[in-house]
Amino acid sequence: MSGGGPTSGGGPTSGGGPTSGAPDTTGGRAPDHAPRTVVVTSMASDAHTWNLVFLQLLIEELGYRVVNLGPCVPDEVLVEECRDLRPAMVVISSVNGHGYQDGMRVIRRLRAADPLATTPVVVGGKLGVTGDEDSERVAELMAAGFDAVFDDGADPAAALRGFVHSLQAGPPALAGRAAAG
């Protein structure tokens, strides 16, 4: 897999089905809710990994299969992996303070790829390096196409949990795009 990061559930080509090597825990019947795939990644300029492992564990705890693309993921690799996987959601993390700059570039590329135009995409972490108030950056990222932006402020884990629960409750309440559109 491109990106060199750890994966869960057998890698990006594994569907988790009977031929994936995963043990059958359904007693031969179809599961009530098959876990959906979430892509977790950083962006090309961010070499941090601890945040990605934390996000992977959090999202797996919520019942999703996670494909962790790892650090320093080039834009084209992220787009191609997401095209192939067609994930339920893409979670992008930034620790180096380039979340806004890299996020604006990456979201345009993801939204331009037809199968990803409506995929929920969130970004979180350090949006800038100055430590200034990020409300303007958050608004611009939402207007650019992110469905949620979790800045380094409050409790981003709780905010992500809330967003995931809103997706599980039914049709995505894509408030970010609705507010921006």
Image: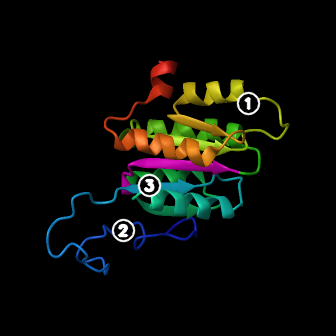
Q: Which mark is residue 66?
A: none
Which tag is nearer the camera, tag 1 or tag 2? Answer: 1
Instruction: List x then y, in percent, for residue 120.
Output: 44, 40
Q: Is residue 169 above or below residue 54?
A: above
Left or right: where does residue 24 sit relative to residue 134?
left
Check the image and name the residue furthest to the right. Answer: 130
- Magenta span includes 27: no
Answer with the quarter of the image where residue 19 lies. Answer: bottom left
Q: Residue at x 71, y 42 (%)?
A: 152
Q: Secondary structure at mark 2?
A: loop
Instruction: List x then y, in percent, for residue 150.
Output: 62, 39
Instruction: List x then y, in percent, for residue 6.
Output: 55, 71
- Residue designated by label 2: 13
Answer with the quarter of the image where residue 30 lies. Answer: bottom left
Quick check: marks 1 and 2 in contact, CB under 8 Å?
A: no
Q: Secondary structure at mark 3?
A: strand
- Residue designated by label 1: 134
Relative to the observer, which residue lies in front, 127 or 28?
28
User: Few, some or many C-alpha atoms within 10 Å of disc 2 (few <14, some 14-19, many ≥20)?
Assistant: few
Q: Residue at x 36, y 68 (%)?
A: 13
Which amino acid type is marked by label 1?
Asp
Q: Residue at x 35, y 56 (%)?
A: 36
Instruction: List x then y, in percent, for residue 99.
Output: 69, 42
Which amino acid type is marked by label 2?
Thr
Disc on the earlier residue, 1 or 2: 2
Left or right: where does residue 143 sit relative to residue 173?
right
Chain part drawn in magenta: 84-94
Could you tell me how far apart the alpha carbons at marks 1 and 2 are, in whole angstroms?
37 Å
- Residue designated by label 3: 38
Disc on the earlier residue, 3 or 2: 2
Which amino acid type is marked by label 3?
Val
Left or right: where does residue 76 sit relative to residue 129?
left
